[in-house]
Amino acid sequence: MHRPLVITDDPALLDDLVRIAAAAGAQLDVAQLPAHARPYWNLAPLVAVGADQADAVAATAPPPRDQVLLVTRTPDDPDTWRRCVAAGAQAVVTLPGDERDLVDRFADAMEPEPRSGPVICVLGGRGGVGASVLSACLALHASGAAQLRTLLVDADPLGGGMDALLGHEEAPGARWGDLVAREGRISSSALQKALPAFGDLAILSFQRGEAAPIPAQAMRSVLDAGQRGFDLVVVDLPRHFDPAAVEALTRAKTTLLVAAADVRGVLSAIQVLGEAGKHTTDLRTILRPGIVDADTAVTSLGIPCAGTLPDQPRLTATLNRGELPKLGPRTALGALCASLLQDLLPTSP
């Protein structure tokens, strides 16, 4: 992979740019003179031209390209924008004030082609209704049969751990506790390398022991990285909305509310729906059969029904043994997951 290119003969500026690039996980190609930069000009994902070399770059008339920045330490220099235009740059970056922005730009330059994966949230209308199981099965089916690079995010600190649900609680890799202290952007490639992964499925769960709430900024950074690096992001939400859950809801393409078709199940789901509806728009229900007629339950909830999740008598025993459920097209779970992906991601395989 090609590296960002820096053109400067200013040692102090170069030291700053190397340090900033390191913060973004990037290494640089460095040219002290524009003539040395010619082999890299069209190949580099980003070019940072020091103000000391801007006129010299302009004199060589390099071919036009995007992602060219002029980097300066003198924001009040009236000649800055003339140099910017002459060098073919699209923006001026002033240090140290724009340092965080430059970190993000270097990180963007090192990212692979973004995937723009949608966020699908799954929410239980009451406890024990099967929302976490549906989240896991949807992610398993997407990463398996549908061949989508999938991120499964556990957003429930008191849920027992999505990794444990899938029998991978001992798998090495980062958990939420390793990520919550990070500020700003997370590289999608770094996130993929850090998390426990099984084929095309990566899982972000909670560590054992005390699980602190997730800051909204941490959830935002993870979902940003997930959407850039994955084809699908599935988030298993708690029923009590903390700032992280609200952050996920606001980013969701669709939120699936799993509701039991009995009196208390419907009433509880209506309460949860009232809170979720404050933060997201596309809400659909997954109905668990019960004593209340399905049409009556759906009408009471007032949102479209995306499918039915029948009882799975052997599913609990399967999961407790640390085995993954079978999600073939002839199984109820497999058929439901395939149908959901077809409806929610119509362009997926």
Image (cartoon, rainbow, N blue to C red):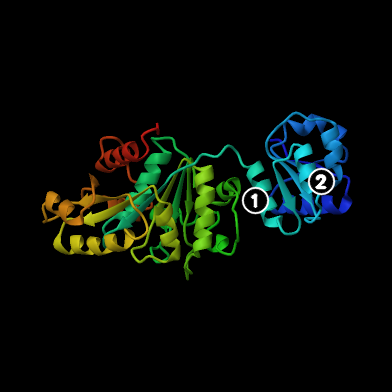
- Viewer-nearest of labels 2 and 1? 2
Q: Nearer the viewer, residue 5 or 164?
A: 5
Residue 38 placement (x, y as % from top left): 81, 30
> Which residue is the site of mark 1?
104
Type of the residue with mark 1? Asp
State whether residue 341 appears in this view. yes
- Above or below — where is 141 with respect to 23? above
Residue 271 placement (x, y as % from top left): 25, 64
**Is disc 1 surrounded by few (<14), some (14 to 19) or many (20+) residues within 10 Å?**
some
Residue drawn at (19%, 60%), measured in percent from left and top? 266
Image-based side of 25 in relation to 227, left or right: right
**Quadrant of the image occupied by residue 273:** bottom left
- Above or below — where is 64 with respect to 71? above
Q: Secondary structure at mark 1?
A: helix
- Above or below — where is 337 with respect to 19? above
**Quadrant of the image occupied by residue 43:** top right
Residue 211 placement (x, y as % from top left): 47, 68
Type of the residue with mark 2? Gly
Residue drawn at (54%, 64%), measured in percent from left and top? 177
Residue 5 placement (x, y as % from top left): 77, 40
Image-based side of 179 in relation to 166, left or right: right
> Which residue is the site of mark 2?
50
Image-based side of 293 in relation to 125, left or right: left
